[in-house]
Image (tube, grey):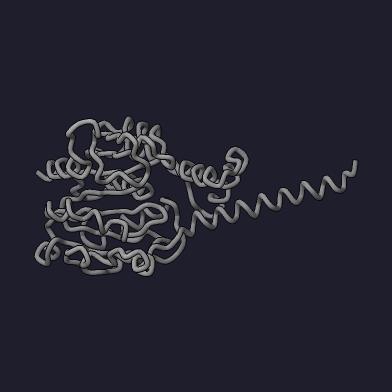
Amino acid sequence: MNFGLLGLLALAIVIVAVLYVVALLWRLRHPPRRTAGWAIARGRPLDPGAVGAAWREVEASGLPLWLVGRDEATLERSDAPLAVLLHGWGNSRLDWLGRLEPWLSSGFRLAIPDLRGHGDAPGASTLGDADREDVLAILRGIGAVGSASSPPLVLVGHSLGSVVALRVAAALGDHEVDLRGVVAFAPYERLRTPAVAELASREAEVGVLLPALLAGLRFLGVREHSTSDAARAIRTPLVIVHGAADLISPLEDARAIAAASPQAELLVLDGAGHLDLWSRPVDPASQAPSVEEVLRSRVEAWLR
């Protein structure tokens, strides 16, 4: 047996595995950019004005941010209730343009940022780690926290954005803020959940590569956090919307997060996946309202 040849083969396997993990780390931290060019190529709206809303663009905490209202009067009202909409990994603020109506018709002002490494935002994605501090800085910058006159606040997120929303809500317990509730679409418990989904989508050996991938993220300064711990810390209503057929954020994660919060309501949508949650009926077998209608009723109750 040629042990020298076996040694070279083993070294080659290790080098290939390391390069594969490095490529995955790069992809996780540098998701596809959904910017104006992406929207134009697909015939999608470019900004809130294209869907009939009043808006302006500002920069907060170094991130591009849309401030949106149903009209100029609402946009200028500092006392209007504020909803912060946080997109998922690989998406951008453009993803919310088809979902503004229930918030606008309920009189909200909206703050819609691009998270780090997404859309037009600079840098690399921190996968929910430093994003919490970014969103807290945005809230301070637009006057949503820190004073007795801060407006009623609702945090809304999808996937990565829902994890960030819950972590922000937990952190707001130490701030002067009028937080009324959180809406979380397809949240997951820990960063390893989407990492496993990414490995599985490539038919990679999860058991071998996942520890190396998580170690690489820690080396880059990206820490894992428990979403259930964040849910346990909040004292406001929480609505979780999750698809029973979600292959990225398993339903077990949503159940665990909901169980951690005494004020959580979990809406499970049969047949829904990770991305098709918004306009589905809550119960397809009945005349039940859509998720959009349910959320509207819950959020309007929070504002009373």
In depth, the one of 178 and 105 nearer the eye is: 105
Which residue: 24% across, 59% down? 111
Which residue: 25% across, 34% down? 284
Location of residue 17 in the rendering, given as x and y in whole percent from the top left corner: 66, 49
Residue at the extreme right of the image, as rendered: 1
> In the rendered view of the protein, which quadrant contains the C terminus?
top left
Location of residue 79 in the rendering, given as x and y in whole percent from the top left corner: 12, 57
> In the rendered view of the protein, which quadrant contains the N terminus?
top right
In depth, the one of 120 and 290 nearer the eye is: 290
Q: Is residue 79 visible?
A: yes
Q: How many marks?
A: 0
Answer left or right for 235 relative to 228: left
Location of residue 109 in the rendering, given as x and y in whole percent from the top left corner: 17, 58
Answer left or right for 194 relative to 242: right
Location of residue 221 in the rendering, given as x and y in whole percent from the top left corner: 51, 53
Which residue: 50% across, 54% down? 28
Eyeballing the image, is 130 above or below 299?
Answer: below
In depth, the one of 134 and 299 nearer the eye is: 299
Answer left or right for 188 relative to 136: right
Q: Is residue 120 visible?
A: no
Eyeballing the image, is 111 above or below 281?
Answer: below
Which residue: 14% across, 64% down? 75
